[in-house]
Amino acid sequence: MHGVTVMTKKLQKDSKYALADADGDGIVTDEEMDRHATWIRLENEDKQADTQRMMAIVSMFVSIIGVAFLLLPVISLDRMDAISSVLSTFLIANTGIVAAYITGSALSKTKMK
């Protein structure tokens, strides 16, 4: 490399950054640190996407199961009238979670293009 100085960092014993040392020489270069930071960011984004997906799936199934249960003859109409306002708020909130997930997924896919 002409005129470019590569910065290196030596690690202390049992450093938490030892994972970033790709070639195992005990020195972490800027390139290795950048690669490690990128890897950590990608892992965190993947975990976040998994969590958001699970929240949307649970919200969707709870709403479907809740409505199906209420349509069974087990619950009287008087009791259904009593909980109708709470139920409508619950269903709107769960629909909002699913809609936010779908919107977020669509937006993140358009950013990748």
Image (cartoon, helix red, strand yellow):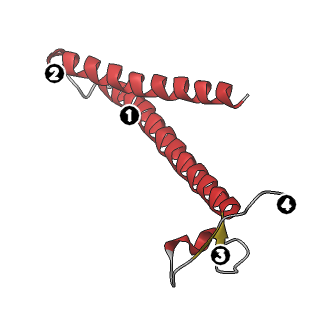
Amino acid carrying label 2: it is Arg
Residue 13 or 57: which is nearer the viewer? 13
Q: Earlier in the sequence, mark 2 or mark 1?
A: 1
Q: Residue at x 47, y 39 (%)?
A: 52
Q: Earlier in the sequence, mark 3 or mark 2?
A: 3
Amino acid carrying label 3: it is Ile
Tell me if mark 2 has few (under 14), some (14-19) or many (20+) residues whose alpha carbon lies within 10 angstroms of its own.
few
Q: Are marks 3 and 2 in contact (CB under 8 Å)?
A: no
Q: Earlier in the sequence, mark 2 or mark 4?
A: 4
Q: Are marks 2 and 1 in contact (CB under 8 Å)?
A: no
Question: Percent position (x, y) of residue 45?
Answer: 55, 46
- Answer whether residue 9 is visible to the viewer in this image: yes
Question: Percent position (x, y) of residue 22?
Answer: 70, 71
Identify residue for label 1: 62
Identify residue for label 3: 27
41 vs 22: above or below: above
79 vs 36: above or below: above
Identify residue for label 4: 1
Q: Are marks 2 and 4 in contact (CB under 8 Å)?
A: no
Judge from the rendering whether residue 79 lies leftward or rightward of residue 108; answer left or right: left
Q: Residue at x 85, y 60 (%)?
A: 1
User: CA separation, marks 2 and 4?
Assistant: 78 Å
User: CA separation, marks 3 and 1?
Assistant: 51 Å
Q: Residue at x 67, y 24 (%)?
A: 110
Eye-nearest disc, 3 or 1:
3
Residue 79: assigned label: 2
Amino acid carrying label 1: it is Val
Q: Are marks 1 and 4 in contact (CB under 8 Å)?
A: no
Eye-nearest disc, 3 or 4:
4
